[in-house]
Image: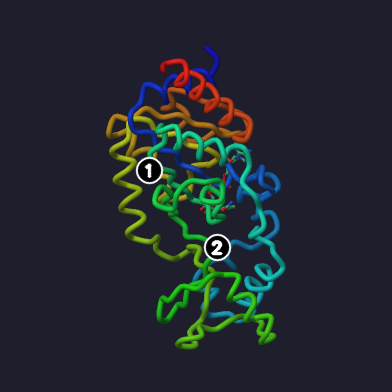
Amino acid sequence: MEEVEQLAELILASSTVVAFTGAGISTESGIPDFRGPEGIWTKFDPEDFTIQRFVSSSAVRTMHWTMLREGRFSSEAEPNPAHYALAELYRLGKLNCAITQNIDNLHQKAGLPDTTVFELHGNMRRAVCLTCQRRFPLPDVLETMVQQKAESPLCPHCHGILKPDAVFFGEALPEDVLLQATRRSKSCDLFIVIGSTLVVYPAASMPSYATQAGAKLAVVNLTPTPLDRLASVLIRDKAGQAIPRVVERVRHRLNNRI
Ligand code: NAD
């Protein structure tokens, strides 16, 4: 049986399916990943993405906000067939949730309800004040910046430093999201990794939580991951090609059951 068919069968045989997504699911939406050949680290210094640099250097803050104002990092990106297929899997009653490392909001844009997306690394559609922790929609912040001709924005309430609400290196992950994601990973019976190198922790612990609790593992990724050897199904293909084919088979099989 080919891998796509095998994954469809696994999904049909499972009662609680969790998808775990990384930057690789969004490359076909035009957002580069970090570690691929065209990845972000081939163009930027990872040090500039640490919370310490962001807080201590106004030049680094200006760099971040300039990139956001110029539309780098993708606020205009659209979901691709892999995001839409996962949303369809949810509507078919065969996806419990998506745990994502991505900050691009594309699962929600494709139709997954907010309550089913656990964003381990935050979301770039918001900004957060580092002093009072208030959050603001990113477009509002960018508009105010342009009006005020500011190089980087300050909190309208307390004048604290505003930061994009994505987790920077050196910052803790949002505790409640981490807790929920851990629970879902430990209680699923099928865990599907899509587009992640599985090297960024603690996010990369999720698949191990799942397999240690007895779940089956599937991996859909263009390049090898450290957990491939544990996978019941391994698909070495583009997510935007493979996931829609898997979901199409699931839909077909469900329709034929009725
Ligand atoms: P990564 O960059 O480390 O790895 C991406 C993986 O996806 C690679 O193994 C690559 O081979 C694979 N891949 C690339 N295109 C693919 C495709 N079309 N189909 C299937 N596989 C594909 O990403 P990661 O594991 O998510 O970890 C990196 C960190 O990057 C995360 O913390 C995440 O927050 C952040 N990030 C997010 C975005 C985003 O929000 N879209 C973009 C870049 C980085």
Disc number for residue 29: none
Q: For the view shown, which residue lies furthest in the front direction?
A: 258
For mark 1, what is the residue?
206
Residue occupying the point 43% across, 46% down: 99
Residue occupying the point 62% across, 35% down: 240
Label 1 environment density (alpha carbons within 10 Å; few <14, some 14–19, many ≥20) = many
Which is more toward the observer, 125 or 39? 125
Q: Position of residue 83 (x, y in %)?
A: 56, 41
User: Compared to 231, does 123 lie above or below?
Assistant: below
Say which label, 2 or 1, has the lower sequence index.
2
Residue occupying the point 41% across, 76% down: 133
Left or right of residue 67: residue 24:
left
Q: Position of residue 56 (x, y in %)?
A: 53, 80
CA separation in Å, label 2 and label 1: 22 Å
- The amino acid beneath tag 1 is Met
Label 2 environment density (alpha carbons within 10 Å; few <14, some 14–19, many ≥20) = many
- The amino acid beneath tag 2 is Met
